[in-house]
Image (cartoon, rainbow, N blue to C red):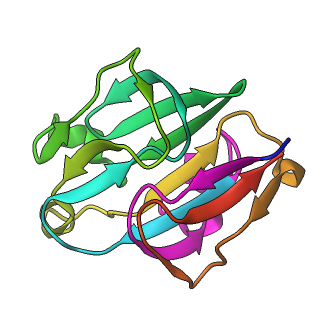
C-alpha cells in the first residue's frame, strides 16, 4: 500500500539534485523531492504524513508512518540559527495527522541571512524506485497538497 506524502510547505517543487547540500542532492539519506518555499514571514509547515514525531528540531523533523520515516528539513544550514525564527507546535513523541501544523518559520529571514530556504522532503532509507512524484519539478504546490507517493 502506497503512502501519500504531502507538501509540508507552499512553494515550487525542485528535484533533490538541485538542493545546495551534497547530503541531500546525492540522496544519501534517501530519495524524495524538495520545495523552494514562498518567501513570506510566519510560513506554516505541516506534517507530510500521519504518524508519530520521532525527531524534532526547530529546523527539521521526522514523522514515522507505516514503518517509514519522512524527513522535512527547513532550509539549508538553518541549524546554525539555533532555533531563531522557528516556532514549534508539537513535541517529540506526539501523534500528528497529515496536514497538521508542526512548525512555523520566517522564510524571508532565512533568505535574508544568506541561507537557502529550500526544503528537502525525504523518504528516509527509502529506495529510489519506491518513490513516485505526484507533483513534478516546476509545479507550485500549497502546503498539504500531495507531493509524492512512497510504496
Q: Residue at x 21, y 49 (%)?
A: 104
Q: Magenta stretch: residue 85 in it? A: no
Residue 68 is at least partly visible in this image:
yes
The answer to which of 26 and 83 lies nearer the viewer is: 83
- Considering every residue shown, the one lying at the far front of the view is 97
Q: Residue at x 73, y 66 (%)?
A: 133
Q: Residue at x 52, y 65 (%)?
A: 145
Q: Position of residue 42 (x, y in %)?
A: 14, 59
Q: Position of residue 16 (x, y in %)?
A: 61, 62
- Considering every residue shown, the one lying at the far right of the view is 129
- Please determine whether, in this image, residue 68 is positioned above or below residue 121: above
The region drawn magenta spans 3-31
Residue 21 is at least partly visible in this image:
no
- Considering every residue shown, the one lying at the far bottom of the view is 138
The answer to which of 24 and 11 lies nearer the viewer is: 11
- Please determine whether, in this image, residue 119 is positioned above or below residue 142: above
The answer to which of 46 and 70 lies nearer the viewer is: 46
User: Residue 60 falls in which quadrant of the image?
Assistant: top left
Q: Position of residue 80 (x, y in %)?
A: 22, 40
Amino acid at each position: 500500500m502506497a503512502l501519500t506524502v504531502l507538501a509540508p510547505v507552499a512553494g515550487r517543487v525542485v528535484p533533490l539534485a538541485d538542493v545546495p547540500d551534497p547530503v541531500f542532492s546525492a540522496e544519501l539519506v534517501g530519495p524524495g523531492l524538495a520545495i523552494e518555499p514562498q518567501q513570506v514571514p510566519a510560513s506554516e509547515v505541516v506534517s507530510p504524513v500521519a504518524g508519530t514525531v520521532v525527531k524534532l528540531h526547530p529546523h527539521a523533523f521526522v514523522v514515522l508512518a507505516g514503518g517509514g520515516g519522512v524527513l522535512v528539513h527547513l532550509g539549508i544550514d538553518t541549524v546554525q540559527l539555533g532555533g531563531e525564527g522557528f516556532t514549534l507546535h508539537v513535541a517529540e513523541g506526539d501523534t500528528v495527522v497529515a496536514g497538521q501544523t508542526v512548525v512555523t518559520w520566517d522564510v524571508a529571514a532565512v533568505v535574508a541571512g544568506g541561507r537557502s530556504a529550500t526544503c528537502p522532503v525525504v523518504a528516509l532509507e527509502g529506495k529510489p524506485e519506491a518513490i513516485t512524484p505526484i507533483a513534478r519539478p516546476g509545479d507550485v504546490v500549497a502546503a498539504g497538497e500531495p507531493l509524492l507517493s512512497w510504496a
